[in-house]
């Protein structure tokens, strides 16, 4: 399926999905590819509209579930290889990423000043990745993921004592 048909099919599927839920939103679909590939690697679907907060849910849990379901629907309708679907609603993920980056920097500063390891609340994989990436270049700070499943979290440690 060519890219324009894929986008059209995804947009139609997302719109139908929203209609079945009794919701109205502007649906935007774009394709993204890895740098070394010509073929679309994933679909980015953005929903914009009023009263979509319930679709996001607490810390984006509903958003994550809807992303999975919508991905299944879209892949069922296309006859090509499977495509990964990423969903954002009213730029929730953009805002969450900014918050997490700021939170990571503040936590690192606290660890630096106290010298004590800090354990963050459990997070989903993409959120943990944001924290790890935000602190990757922070001097004197080290991050690690601990725990299993829904309890997986990040620890932030000072490496000041390792410098000498």
Image (cartoon, rainbow, N blue to C red):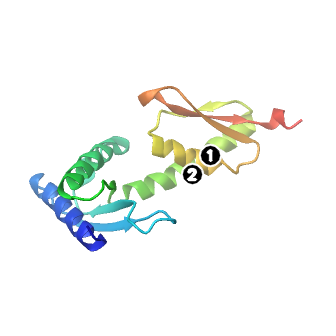
| Res 114 label | none
Position of the N terminus, as image quadrant, is bottom left
Where in the figure is residue 78, as x and y percent of width and height? 21, 59
The residue carrying mark 1 is 106
The residue carrying pointer 2 sits among few (fewer than 14), some (14 to 19) or many (20 or more) residues within 10 Å by Cα, namely: some
Q: Quadrant of residue 119?
A: top right
Question: Vertically, is 115 above or below 50?
Answer: above
Quick check: 149 left or right of 104?
Answer: left
Where in the figure is residue 51, as x and y percent of width and height? 21, 56
The residue carrying mark 2 is 102
The single residue placed furthest to the right in the displayed view is 164
Position of the C terminus, as image quadrant, is top right
The residue positioned 52% from the left and 48% from the top of the image is 100
The residue positioned 77% from the left and 36% from the top of the image is 159
Cα–Cα span, label 2 and label 1 = 6 Å
Question: Vertically, is 58 above or below 11?
Answer: above
Q: Quadrant of residue 150?
A: top left
Where in the figure is residue 132, as x and y percent of width and height? 59, 45
The single residue placed furthest to the bottom in the displayed view is 4
Q: Secondary structure at mark 1?
A: helix
The residue carrying pointer 1 sits among few (fewer than 14), some (14 to 19) or many (20 or more) residues within 10 Å by Cα, namely: few
Q: Are marks 2 and 1 in contact (CB under 8 Å)?
A: yes
Question: Vertically, is 66 above or below 157?
Answer: below
């Amino acid at each position: 399926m060519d890219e324009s048909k894929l986008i059209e099919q995804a947009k139609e599927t997302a719109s139908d999905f929203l209609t079945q839920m009794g919701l109205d939103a502007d649906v935007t679909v774009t394709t993204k590819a890895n740098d070394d590939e010509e073929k679309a690697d994933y679909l980015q679907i953005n929903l914009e509209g009023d009263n979509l907060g319930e679709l996001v849910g607490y810390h984006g849990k509903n958003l994550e579930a809807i992303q999975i379901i919508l991905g299944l629907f879209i892949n069922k309708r296309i006859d090509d290889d499977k495509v990964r679907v990423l969903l954002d609603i009213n730029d929730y993920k953009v805002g969450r990423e900014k918050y997490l980056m700021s939170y990571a920097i503040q936590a690192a500063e606290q660890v630096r000043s106290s010298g004590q390891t800090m354990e963050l609340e459990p997070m989903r994989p993409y959120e943990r990745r944001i924290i790890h990436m935000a602190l990757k270049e922070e001097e004197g700070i080290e991050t690690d993921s601990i725990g299993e499943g829904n309890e997986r979290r990040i620890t932030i440690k000072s490496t000041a004592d390792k410098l000498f």
